[in-house]
Amino acid sequence: MPLFSIPLSGLLASSNALNVISNNLANLNTIGFKDESANFQDLFYQTLGTTGAGNPIQMGAGSQIGSISSNFNNGNLQNTGVPTNVAITGNGFFVVRDASGAMEFTRAGNFSINAQGELVTTGGQNVMGYPAVNGVINAGQGLTPIQLGQGQINQPAATTTMSQTTNLDASAAVGDTYSTPLTVYDSLGSSHVLTFTYTKTGTNAWDYQVTLPAADTGGTGSPTVVASGSLAFNSSGALTSPASAVSGITVNGLVDGAAPLNLTWNLYDPNGGSNLTQVASQSTTSTTNQNGYASGTLQKFTIGADGIIQGSFSNGQSQDIGQIALANFANNQGLQLIGGNDYAPTLASGSPVIGAPASGGRGSMTGGAVELSNVDISTEFTQLIVTQRGFQANARVVTTFDSISNETINLQSR
């Protein structure tokens, strides 16, 4: 009698393969989806005897799905222009944490920001990475949820150095003055306007005085003098004295409670040229520079190839605010698919090796883009036809076996 189990095993295997193909096609537009392939294998064999040459005579028991493997090749990148979107090129998985605290892994980078200002997946899991403290990323602090809320503050920085590019009119009369302002910031981010007043005292000679409004230090009346001295120029109009920067300009007792300002006035540029000149042209200040700034709030951000998120703040400053982490596995095929574009590690995959992108064999990132599914529709339809033919062939064997069985039964009844 025919063994119906053999074609039935083929029907089951083909049916499962069709399910895999169907799942691939269903996820054709799923961000970060990886194409899967069903791999057939034969079942155990029954030995019926041996040939005259001593070779075994064996009959197989059918087929089954031996494995379903994933194709982890990169999908195409699609630019979205959405700053929270990020795509991986190369190896690696984003590290995400669900509400229970369990770590999961995904290639889908179509992230968004939740009400708490955290970077999250479409399923609400936190995207994990390394935090930045005052613009410095410290991977040694361990993984934390990435914070990108617009309420983030860039802390103020007190001015420590300042300069101005100023020309003093060489044709001015002795006693003539020229004043120009320069805004500096204290440790709390409050601004203060210093006034530089230059008075001509003779040929190629000027005095300077730096003052601060009396109200800034709790006083009244005349401005507070914080620095004064003399300037000397050569016959070419270049500054000769002082020969170096004016340091030790200190402002104490600021009414807002900030720390004292300790300022250095750079009279020369990095190449040794003087910032102050004296030629026969109108006294004017073309540029002023200082290194302090007020506090600012996060306005926008970009994600670099190394996963570093750089924020731009309302005070004009740019600062690193975090770095997205990636994880590698010894055996990607050992990962367990748990739905929602997510994978979970198993003993077969090995433990995740987590670190910074573009290092340790991990891939790089592209901000404002997503990785598309790597399913190839033409390949899937080809496999669909081949698998369908296999299913039809096994179904025909079943009907043939059925006919043979009926014939055998009819022989017995004759």
Image: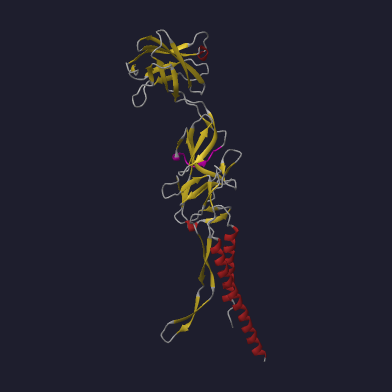
> Which residue in the rendered view is the most extreme toward the right?
413
Compared to residue 14, the image places residue 53 above or below, namely below
Q: Quadrant of the C terminus?
A: bottom right
Q: Looking at the image, which residue is at 47% across and 49% down?
A: 327
The answer to whether residue 296 is seen in the rendering is yes
Q: How many marks?
A: 0
Q: Which residues are magenta?
A: 139-148
Compared to residue 164, the image places residue 154 above or below, namely below
Q: Is residue 22 magenta?
A: no
Q: Quadrant of the N terminus?
A: bottom right
Q: Looking at the image, which residue is at 37% across and 25% down?
A: 269
The way the protein has been coloured in the rendering is: secondary structure
Q: Give the percent coordinates (x, y) of residue 376.
A: 54, 60
Front residue (pair 198, 344): 198
Q: Give the percent coordinates (x, y) of residue 209.
A: 42, 12
Q: Give the percent coordinates (x, y) of residue 55.
A: 43, 82
Q: Give the percent coordinates (x, y) of residue 391.
A: 59, 72
Front residue (pair 13, 149): 149
Compared to residue 144, the image places residue 400 above or below, namely below
The answer to whether residue 352 is seen in the rendering is no
In the figure, residue 266 lies in which quadrant? top left
Q: Is residue 147 magenta?
A: yes
